[in-house]
Image: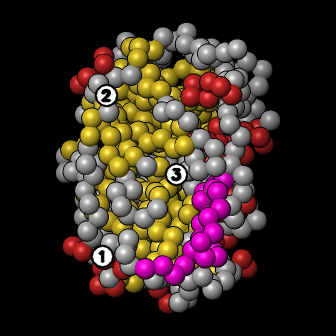
Amino acid sequence: MRGALIAIAFASLCTLGCPPGSASSEADRGGSPGAAGSPAEGGTGGQVAAGGSAGATAPGGAGGIATGGSGGTTADVPAWILAEETWQPLPGAAYFSSDCRIEQGRAERLAAPPLRWEPCGSGCERADVVAGLGEFAATAELTSRVVGGESRAYLAVSNVLPETPLGLVVIDRHIDLSDGTTFAALRRTRAESAGGNCLGSLLGEQSLGRKYSFGDDGTMMEAIGLLDPETGAWRWLAPWTPLQQIGIWYRHALEATGHLVVGHGGNLRASREAGSTELVEVDPLEAVSLAAAISTGTQVVWSELERSEIGSRLRSWAPGNDEPTLRATEPDADVCRVAAGDATLATWAVVPDGLRGCDLDQPGGRFRLIGTDGQQHPTSPILDEKLFVSALATWGDHVAAVVHHYRIPDEDLDEYTHVLLAQGGAWVARRIASLPDHTVHKIALTDRHLYVTQTPLGMHYRRVDAVYRYDLASFESIGTPFGWDYEPRSE
């Protein structure tokens, strides 16, 4: 059972960029999506594979979207995307072939239109993230940080232009949601004749980083970049390495310090020094298994489960520390999700009933806020319904979660997933339903807003067309009241 737990814990992170032959490679070739009702539909990231035969579009599976096409005209392609002066080579670009090019944008030449917020209900606004930049957008991630003394949220999204004079082009954008501007971007192109791979993905859940994998199956190389949200500058770790050297387990970017943290096998490793891909062991994680982890930009926080008995603990590590810091313990519960805010951590834990708590069909889950001093606030009421939490966010005394329910009839799939938004003191909660034929995907919180992305159910659920924001000052009018005895509709 513990082996199954480890697989579950890393499954969503593997979809961030598994090499061919791994769990997501079928999806990158256009494989089948997860079945309706599968937690995979709320998973993390995904990868967009640039290239393919002219005009061919393959539906994306659990790991990402594969699409193709080449040729085309400039008629529907913004000039700044095609202009060579917009882009500059990555350090180490000699590794790339002419068939696979990845370039970073010059901030002063990025001309993506700013987001335009439009009302979408009480306390709700919506902004289009395609906005004429390609055929569709995909692989969104939402991140919150304190920058310049203010809380800000960032959206990472990939805009796909299947047919341009350059072949297929993917623009990997990072958007500051405080003003809607694209403050950083990379351009990925691949010729139709290219062999091997030209893949890009996000680097860890709620991390401000990206990785690119390229080359033939036997000689895959990767470039890893960390993004400074204050300046929009990229730091590319060196040296670039073969994909297998670091491995495909979970990774998190500490963009403020320039370090990469990797959970691999039975230990935790991190960059030996800022800007390096050479990794050293942080902790052997003896007698425990990693269940969840999150980056704050300056440190990584994770939950680990005892292998021989029920119980878990939260620990953190930051560069300069000789060993991890104990943050909190949960002796009678398994912490399956962790989130970090400005002054608190939030957890989603399950009190096991027979099986280990992080197995996906376990009832009896609860939320908790934990102060930076380790003080544990009262837990939320227990949710007895069988469900799965695929994303968790916190800021101040607010907690938000993407909740997936089980045993939903086909005609009621809109009940499958929703956002639970709660005030952590009294645990008063609101429920934001998914859109018709959609599933909630990503969330982030700041001191003023909750941000949400949703993706269509079915063959293209990794796509995203908009980002939504909810005004926390209008808490009592957001969505509908949520009772902790909530049950989705059933036959």
The residue drawn where x is 41% and y is 39% is 452
Find residue 128 and report its horizontal and vertical position in percent.
35, 49
The residue drawn where x is 63% and y is 69% is 56
Badge 1 amino acid:
Trp
Magenta stretch: give its range: 52-73
Q: Earlier in the sequence, mark 1 or mark 3?
A: 1
Measured in 3D between alpha carbons, the distance from the residue under mark 2 to the one under mark 3, in whole angstroms, is: 23 Å
Residue 97 in which image quadrant: bottom right
User: Between 144 and 79, which is closer to the camera in this rendering?
Assistant: 79
The N terminus, quarter of image = top right
Q: Secondary structure at mark 2?
A: loop
Q: Is residue 187 above or below residue 471?
A: below
Find residue 60 and report its horizontal and vertical position in percent.
63, 56
Residue 251 in which image quadrant: bottom right
Residue that carries the numbered disc 2 in the rendered image:
121
Measured in 3D between alpha carbons, the distance from the residue under mark 1 to the one under mark 3, in whole angstroms, is: 23 Å
Find residue 176 and report its horizontal and vertical position in percent.
28, 53
Badge 3 amino acid:
Arg
Badge 2 amino acid:
Gly
The residue drawn where x is 64% and y is 49% is 459
Q: Circles 2 and 3: CB distance less than 8 Å?
A: no
Residue that carries the numbered disc 3 in the rendered image:
463
